[in-house]
Image (cartoon, rainbow, N blue to C red):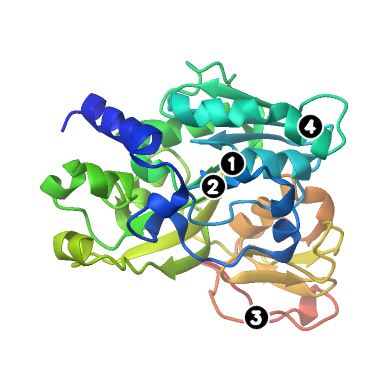
Amino acid sequence: MSQHKSVEAIKDYYGKVLSTNEDLQTSACCTAEAMPSELRKILPEIHQEVRDKFYGCGSPFPPALEGRTVLDLGCGAGRDVYMLSKLVGPTGKVIGVDMTDEQLAVAEKHIQYHTDKFGYDKANVRFVKGYIEDLTGAGIEENSVDLVVSNCVTNLSPDKPRLFSEVFKVLKPGGELYFSDVFADRRIPAPLTEDPVLLGECLGGAMYIEDFRRTMHELGCKDFRSITSNKISLNNAEIERKIGMVNFYSITFRAFKVDLEDRCEDFGQVAYYKGTIPGHPHSFTLDDHHEFFTGKPMLVCGNSADMVSKTAYAEHFRIEGDKSTHLGLFDCGPGIVTSGTNDEATGGACC
């Protein structure tokens, strides 16, 4: 199937075949991952029609969003855009990009509803028709976005290397990519990548996890982190017959537009979380093996130190030590450090 035909098949599936998320044939596009309580509180404020047309597989909302400029790739009917609208506040802004007319029509119809619901003087969201593989062509300026999010959409792209290349173009230095999607434990056999139902159900285009790693490395993103990973149950006999030999996972990843090394290197640095991120007074989770507890020192590799000190999280961390002395590869052991000074910090965590 050509890239053009693939795109048209996906447009048709999400624009005409599916009326609501009840029409999906598997759970891949709408996994039951628990949404954090602070996000669940916002859901009732989202218009019911927008919620009914949500096809996502995670909760790609990092903390500390107030005042930030956020771009949602494949925004569909706008559920995540409107949730982000509430999270960034009246001083932030959210841009949703999608290629499907029917979805965008629903999203745009409810701009004033959510502006009024959140008590804003003017809308802080806008929707753009375009392709996520050509963000600059869709009018998103380079180095203009603080955060790029996406919810179960990158698997639908027929040109994923170009997609992620565009993401890093539009991100500001220190900006963040934080997204959830379906990934596979092997490359999908070619005939199945052309099946319109498998494509629409977020399976046929699922990226092999190792190919994702290679793509990110080739784009200069040498260290990215997994936040959560959950195995997907297909729960459909016909689809199981077609593609049941592949294991699928809903994974949330984060990556930063920061110059990082391709291995975790030890410089003797220690990170302290101040407990100042709203909604996270006791701890902050960087990834699936770094949970920083307020006031407790943690030994970190140079990359982890940069991830929390050269990004939007910088004001919430204190880093002791610099990169003047190299101690070799970082010892990726488990554990949170105890307490006290740099000399007393023990244990660590890294990728």
Q: Position of residue 286 (x, y in %)?
A: 64, 61
User: Mark on residue 347?
Assistant: 3
Q: CA distance from mark 2 to mark 3?
A: 46 Å
Residue 109 is left or right of residue 292, and the answer is: left
Please, what secondary structure does the residue beneath circle 1 have? helix
Question: Could you tell me the amino acid type at mark 2?
Answer: Asp
Question: Could you tell me the amino acid type at mark 3?
Answer: Gly
Residue located beneath label 1 in the image: 49
Asked whether disc 2 touches disc 1, contact meaning CB atoms under 8 Å apart, the reply is yes
Q: CA distance from mark 2 to mark 4?
A: 19 Å
Among numbered discs 4 and 3, the one appearing first in the sequence: 4
Q: Quadrant of the N terminus?
A: top left
Question: Measured along the vertical axis of the image, is residue 332 above or below residue 26?
Answer: below
Please, what secondary structure does the residue beneath circle 4 have? helix
Please, what secondary structure does the residue beneath circle 2 have? helix
Residue 335 is left or right of residue 238, and the answer is: right
Among numbered discs 2 and 3, the one appearing first in the sequence: 2
Q: Position of residue 8 (x, y in %)?
A: 28, 28
Question: Measured along the vertical axis of the image, is residue 22 above or below residue 163?
Answer: below
Which residue is at the front of the view, 135 or 82?
82
Residue located beneath label 4 in the image: 115
Among numbered discs 1 and 3, the one appearing first in the sequence: 1
User: Mark on residue 52?
Assistant: 2
